[in-house]
Image (spheres, grey):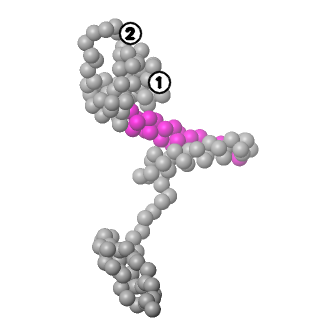
């Protein structure tokens, strides 16, 4: 590993190489050895989000997990029905979770439908109190108390 000296520069080429290593399931320690950069520097870049490295690293890890989930989907479809059903369920559930969470653009089950405002924001709501008087317009309904 490199000793004390000039700081390592984080460039686009280094980021692309690190992305490839992360997608190959390498650890930060392995990446430090491969790139001849102290692991403390890499961890510091991640922690400080140096040049977007922390965000990129998180994205690459998600990309790797999604790729594994997609690979598992193919493997699950090829498993004969006679195999261990308990393990099949665990692997299937984890694969669905990762695919729906990280690949929500393609795999999510949640759909959102707006049937009340036609996609326009609702500006205010007027509450009608039990005594038939409109509530204040600041959307804070105050209870009506009969006066004696």
Q: Over which residues does the magenta segment extend?
A: 57-81
Is residue 34 among what the camera can see?
A: no
Residue in view at x 73 percent, y 41 percent: 84
> Gap between marks 1 and 2, in whole Å?
16 Å
Q: In the orientation shown, which residue stands out farthest toward the front?
A: 148
Image position of 101 with respect to 121: above or below: above
Residue in view at x 71 percent, y 44 percent: 86
Q: Position of residue 119 (x, y in %)?
A: 33, 70
Indicate whether residue 20 is drawn in magenta. Answer: no
Indicate whether residue 72 is drawn in magenta. Answer: yes
Residue in view at x 74 percent, y 44 percent: 82
Which of the image's four quarters has the C terminus?
bottom left
Secondary structure under tag 2 reads loop
Secondary structure under tag 1 reads loop
Which residue is tagged 2?
1
Which of the image's four quarters has the N terminus?
top left
- Earlier residue among tags 1 and 2: 2
Residue in view at x 45 percent, y 84 percent: 145
Image position of 23 with respect to 93: above or below: above
The number of callouts visible is 2
The picture quadrant where one finds residue 5 is: top left
Q: Rate crowding at label 1 as few (under 14), some (14 to 19) or many (20 or more) other CA atoms within 10 Å.
A: few
Which residue is tagged 1?
27
């Amino acid at each position: 590993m490199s000793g004390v000296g000039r700081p390592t520069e984080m460039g686009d080429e280094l980021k692309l190489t690190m992305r490839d290593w992360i997608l190959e399931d390498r650890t930060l320690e392995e990446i430090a050895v491969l790139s001849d950069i102290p692991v403390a520097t890499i961890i510091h870049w991640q922690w400080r989000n140096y040049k977007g490295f922390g965000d990129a690293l998180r994205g690459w890890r998600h990309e790797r997990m999604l790729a594994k989930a997609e690979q598992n989907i193919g493997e699950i479809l090829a498993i004969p029905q006679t195999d261990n059903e308990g393990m099949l369920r665990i692997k299937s559930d984890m694969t669905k979770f990762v695919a729906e969470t990280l690949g929500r653009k393609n795999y999510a089950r949640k759909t959102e439908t707006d049937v009340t405002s036609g996609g326009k924001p609702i500006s205010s709501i007027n509450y009608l109190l039990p005594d038939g008087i409109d509530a204040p317009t600041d959307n804070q309904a105050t209870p009506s108390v009969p006066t004696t």
